[in-house]
Image (spheres, rainbow, N blue to C red):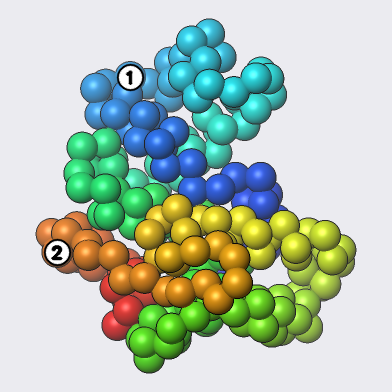
Amino acid sequence: MVKNQVYKSTIKSRPLLFLETKKVSSLLYQGFKEFEVKEKAIVENIFQVNTETRKKEIASSILARLKILDDYLIREVAVGDIESSKAIVLYAIMKTDRLFFEFMNEVFKEKFVFREAFLTDADFNIFFEYKQQQSEKVASWNDYTFYKLKQVYIRILFEAGYLKNQKGNREIERPLLNIDVVEYIRALGDGIYMDILVGE
């Protein structure tokens, strides 16, 4: 359960990575093993990045996210419709990053449910200040860390189709998700995540 995870800020260098995640999901769906995916990342440079460190980092990050998905959801990321595939990746990020989940559950969900139009700088500032009061770990982070976290949260939501733009007034979007995927994840007992992603 995400609430048992420690707070971490590593997400600041790991955005949605949707195309890369789709590529890895496709390989896993074809039957490739984790070590083979990592090998392809290094030898074939399937993510098209410059350094070996970055190749390994992206592969490890994506595989950690996909580890919480079953075969059906991995297949949906690989071959499903774009909106639902992105929502599954967002679900995987929420399942593996406590602070991001809490932001989505405590801030974004409320705006989504009440059909508020924009995600503002104040929303981030209030959330991070509250978490600093709650957690010594979060309180120990510097201002630049929060700046980068805000940047990557915005980028993730934009790339996942939940924000129309990244700058100024960030208008909230409502992607149309495959009902089969939504109900499948609910049936797994993860309705709390789907409530966030469909705004219920």
Mark 1, Cα crowd under 10 Å, few <14 / some 14-19 / many 20+, is: few
- In the rendering, which numbered label is found on residue 179? 2
Within the image, what quadrant is residue 167 found in?
bottom right
State the residue in front, 116 or 68: 116
**148 relative to 194 in the view: left or right:** right
Q: CA distance from mark 2 to mark 1?
A: 29 Å
Mark 2, Cα crowd under 10 Å, few <14 / some 14-19 / many 20+, is: few
- Seen at 29% across and 82% down, the residue is 200
**131 relative to 137 in the view: left or right:** left
Q: Which label sits in the foreground, 2 or 1?
A: 2
Answer yes or no: do the residues labelled 2 and 1 have beta carbons within 8 Å?
no
Name the residue furthest front.
Answer: 168
- Seen at 46% across and 19% down, the residue is 46
Image coordinates for residue 172, horizontal then vertical, percent: 42, 74
| Residue that label 1 marks | 32
**198 relative to 148 in the view: left or right:** left
- Seen at 32% across and 79% down, the residue is 199
Establish if 149 lies above or below 74.
Answer: below
Asked if residue 88 shows in the view, the reply is no
Image coordinates for residue 47, horizontal then vertical, percent: 50, 24
- At label 1, the amino acid type is Phe
Secondary structure beneath label 2 = helix
- At label 2, the amino acid type is Ile
